[in-house]
Image (cartoon, rainbow, N blue to C red):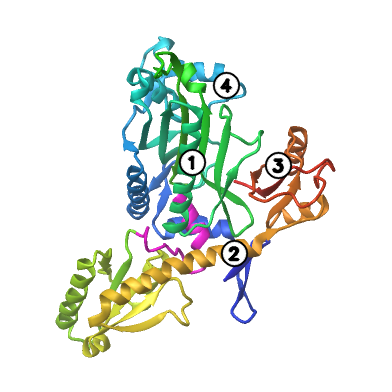
């Protein structure tokens, strides 16, 4: 299904060119579904977000799958202190021109000695490199590849659950290498790994590429980001990799003795992904019925709903469900039997659909007598999402259907991107298309032109595409175009 969002409404083309209209506003829908699906709720202070059990289960599943991937490639998990010395941040700010840390200070209660003030980590580069300087003496100690799953705290004026908050759950990685070439290889490796994780596990067809000079993270030599096109035409950054060169190794004297017994500064990289991915799953895959969670990442893949009526032999149905559940668990599918009394079967189904459970299995008198189960698929419309499968083929059929659901969610997301990418021929067309599309444009790549774009169009993403420029001139300033850029409004 191809969705185009205009003026707060979604319009889609389904099947034989049939136009459908979904009347929900994306922002309002997101704020509502985060609460209704019990992913998160608002805390007592402005900007406080409380992650509820289901939201935490989903985040933990993301972290577990991602950790398995990076540990296979040589990363080791660690943990660094929440509080770091304020002088670390002072030194970082002094060394990096334009850096304006948004952080919280933490002083001892009643202490007036400001030299003893700590800050709550906004990131961990400073304390990590402080420790690298202690651990690294020789080229034989390199490379080091570590990561931690932790929280950070930053001051944000405007917050949205999962998408932008003051306290962030995330996974951050830090590497240190003997040379620039080795560090570059690690960046390429992690770019491929993170991209494959987004696409194959989360079914999120992201764009990835290098950000231009004024958009790159302050202090990094290069910044590579992963961007998701949302249904309202905006871009959401899902992660980034930074080539930090020798910046922090010189700041904290991270040095090693090379094979010629000469002292060198090490080369560093870092990267991060956060629980913004939970919000991205909702925004990318959700529909008017609620969430749709890809099976590979879903904490609950199957919800089993018992159907009882007055003529039902409840004991036999419960026993039959036990047999079904045993088969499901034997084959390592993640399932739950719905035990909440909703009053009606329809309300029971709505509860699990809203949470995006990939499959719902319904078991009543009919299924008991025929030794089958009724399956509802979350990736399909209600008109065609139901099917019967035999008890004897539950394991094979569930695996097949879950694989199809995973592929279909990716396919739906990719179809949206294909119909939302726009190629303006001039700035007039660009200014119109930017409200609802990602615009692929020919651009000169010069700083003054980039500043003009920022001043004129506000907060926009610019990411370089692996495409050569097809026109002679930049559509903004008329100078020779050097690259093809993807530009979109961003959060």
Marks 3 and 2 sit apart, C-alpha to C-alpha, by 24 Å
Question: Which quadrant: the N terminus?
Answer: bottom right
Mark seen at residue 458? 3
Disc nearer the start of the sequence (4/3): 4
Residue 225 coordinates in the image, percent (x, y): 55, 43
Secondary structure at badge 1 equals: loop
Q: Is residue 411 above or below residue 205?
A: below
Disc nearer the start of the sequence (4/1): 4
Name the front one of labels 1 and 3. Answer: 3
Disc nearer the start of the sequence (3/2): 2
Farthest residue toward the front? 260
In the image, the segment drawn in magenta is 277-298
Q: What residue sits 36% from the left and 48% below the top? A: 69
Farthest residue toward the right? 478
| Residue 219 in magenta stretch | no
- Residue holding disc 4: 96
Disc nearer the start of the sequence (1/3): 1
| Label 2 neighbour load within 10 Å: few <14, some 14-19, many 20+ | many
Mark seen at residue 165? 1
Mark seen at residue 416? 2
Q: Nearer the viewer, residue 41 or 482?
A: 482
Q: Is residue 487 above or below residue 222?
A: below
Q: Is residue 38 above or below residue 361?
A: above
| Residue 284 in magenta stretch | yes
Marks 4 and 2 sit apart, C-alpha to C-alpha, by 40 Å
Q: Nearer the viewer, residue 392 or 313?
A: 392
Marks 1 and 3 sit apart, C-alpha to C-alpha, by 21 Å
Disc nearer the start of the sequence (1/2): 1
Name the front one of labels 3 and 2. Answer: 2
Name the front one of labels 1 and 2. Answer: 2
């Amino acid at each position: 299904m191809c969705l185009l969002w205009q003026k707060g409404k979604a319009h889609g083309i389904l099947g034989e060119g049939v136009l459908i209209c979904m009347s929900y506003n994306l922002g309002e829908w997101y704020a509502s579904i985060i609460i209704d699906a019990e992913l998160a709720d608002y805390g007592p202070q402005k900007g406080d977000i409380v992650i509820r059990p289901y939201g935490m289960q989903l985040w933990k599943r993301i972290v577990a799958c991602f950790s398995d991937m990076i540990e296979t490639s040589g990363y080791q998990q660690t943990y660094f202190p929440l509080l770091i010395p304020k002088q670390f941040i002072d030194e970082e700010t002094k060394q990096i021109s334009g850096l304006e840390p948004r952080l919280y200070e933490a002083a001892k209660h009643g202490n007036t000695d400001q030299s003893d003030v700590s800050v709550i980590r906004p990131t961990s580069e400073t304390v990590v490199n402080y420790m690298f300087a202690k651990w690294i003496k020789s080229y034989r100690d390199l490379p080091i590849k570590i990561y931690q799953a932790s929280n950070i705290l930053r001051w944000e004026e405007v917050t949205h659950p999962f998408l932008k908050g003051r306290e962030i759950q995330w996974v951050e990685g830090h590497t240190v290498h003997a040379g620039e070439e080795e560090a570059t290889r690690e960046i390429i490796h992690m770019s491929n790994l993170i991209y494959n994780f987004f696409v194959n596990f989360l079914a999120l067809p992201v764009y990835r590429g290098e950000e231009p000079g004024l958009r790159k993270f302050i202090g990094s030599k290069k910044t590579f980001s992963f961007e998701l096109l949302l249904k309202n035409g905006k871009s959401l950054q899902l992660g980034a990799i930074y080539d930090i060169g020798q910046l922090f190794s010189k700041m904290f004297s991270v040095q090693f003795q090379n094979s010629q017994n000469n002292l060198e500064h090490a080369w560093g990289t870092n990267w991060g992904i956060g629980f913004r991915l939970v919000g991205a799953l909702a925004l990318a895959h959700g529909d008017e019925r609620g969430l749709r969670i890809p099976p590979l990442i879903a904490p609950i893949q199957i919800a089993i709903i018992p159907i009882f009526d007055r003529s039902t032999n409840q004991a036999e149905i419960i026993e039959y469900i036990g047999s079904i559940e045993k088969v499901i668990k034997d084959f390592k599918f993640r399932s739950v039997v719905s035990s909440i009394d909703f009053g009606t079967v329809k309300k029971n189904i709505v509860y699990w659909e809203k949470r995006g459970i990939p499959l719902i299995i319904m078991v009543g008198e009919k299924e008991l007598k025929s030794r089958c189960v009724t399956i509802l698929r979350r990736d399909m419309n209600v008109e065609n999402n139901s099917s019967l499968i035999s008890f004897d083929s539950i394991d094979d059929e569930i695996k097949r259907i879950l694989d199809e659901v995973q592929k279909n969610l990716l396919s739906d997301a990719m179809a949206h991107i294909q119909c939302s990418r726009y190629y303006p021929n001039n700035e007039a067309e660009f200014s119109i298309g930017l409200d609802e599309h990602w615009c692929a444009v020919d651009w000169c790549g010069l700083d003054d032109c980039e500043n003009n774009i920022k001043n004129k169009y506000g907060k926009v993403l610019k990411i370089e595409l692996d495409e050569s420029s097809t026109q002679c001139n930049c559509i903004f300033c008329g100078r020779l175009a050097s690259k093809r850029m993807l530009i979109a409004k961003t959060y």
